[in-house]
């Protein structure tokens, strides 16, 4: 199993809109394309109150590539994402990391 940690820094003042898009749109398309989310978080206490973190689980990098490509190329997703960005982009930066559980992790 491979875990993908993604971090989105929202544009100033746009985190509520980004969270709304994830709630109403993004997770629906993930389900459509078989993308498994382990969890999502915002910052309670820390450096940035503009960040959204989430972890996706993949059987392999090949599965990730196929499912993510299908998701990002989905015409309905592209239209929904574009509609959400009509008043300017919601996301400033995206960071992406692939994680491998350690031998002492309960996920192994």
Image: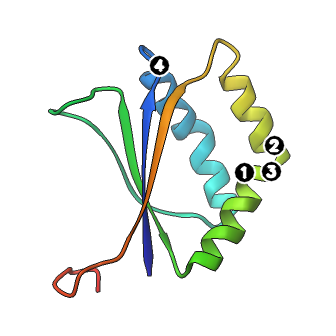
* Left or right of 82 on screen, residue 56: left
Picture coordinates of residue 27, whole percent (x, y): 57, 49
Residue to which mark 4 is pinned: 14
SS under mark 4 = loop
Separation of marks 2 and 1 at Cα, in angstroms: 10 Å
Q: Quadrant of residue 13?
A: top left
Separation of marks 4 and 2 at Cα, in angstroms: 22 Å
Residue to which mark 3 is pinned: 74
Q: Are marks 1 and 3 in contact (CB under 8 Å)?
A: yes
Q: Residue placed at 21% from the left, 81% from the top?
A: 106
* Residue situated in front as seen by the camera: 57 or 11: 11
Above or below, comparing residue 32 to residue 91 in the picture: below
The mark that comes first in sequence, 4 or 2, is 4
* Left or right of 77 on screen, residue 5: left
Residue to which mark 1 is pinned: 72
Q: Are marks 3 and 2 in contact (CB under 8 Å)?
A: yes
Q: Residue placed at 48% from the left, 34% from the top?
A: 93
Image mark for residue 20: none
Q: Residues within 10 Å of mark 3 (few under 14, many from 20)?
A: few
């Amino acid at each position: 199993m491979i875990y993908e940690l993604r971090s989105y820094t929202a544009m100033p003042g746009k985190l509520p809109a980004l969270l709304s898009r994830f709630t109403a749109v993004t997770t629906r398309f993930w389900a459509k394309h078989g993308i498994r989310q382990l969890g999502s978080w915002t910052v309670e206490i820390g450096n940035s109150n503009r960040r959204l973190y989430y972890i996706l689980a993949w059987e392999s990098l090949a599965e990730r590539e196929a499912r993510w490509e299908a998701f990002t190329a989905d015409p309905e997703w592209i239209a929904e994402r574009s509609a959400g960005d009509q008043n300017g982009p919601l996301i400033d930066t995206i960071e992406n990391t692939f994680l491998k559980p350690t031998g002492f992790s309960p996920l192994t």
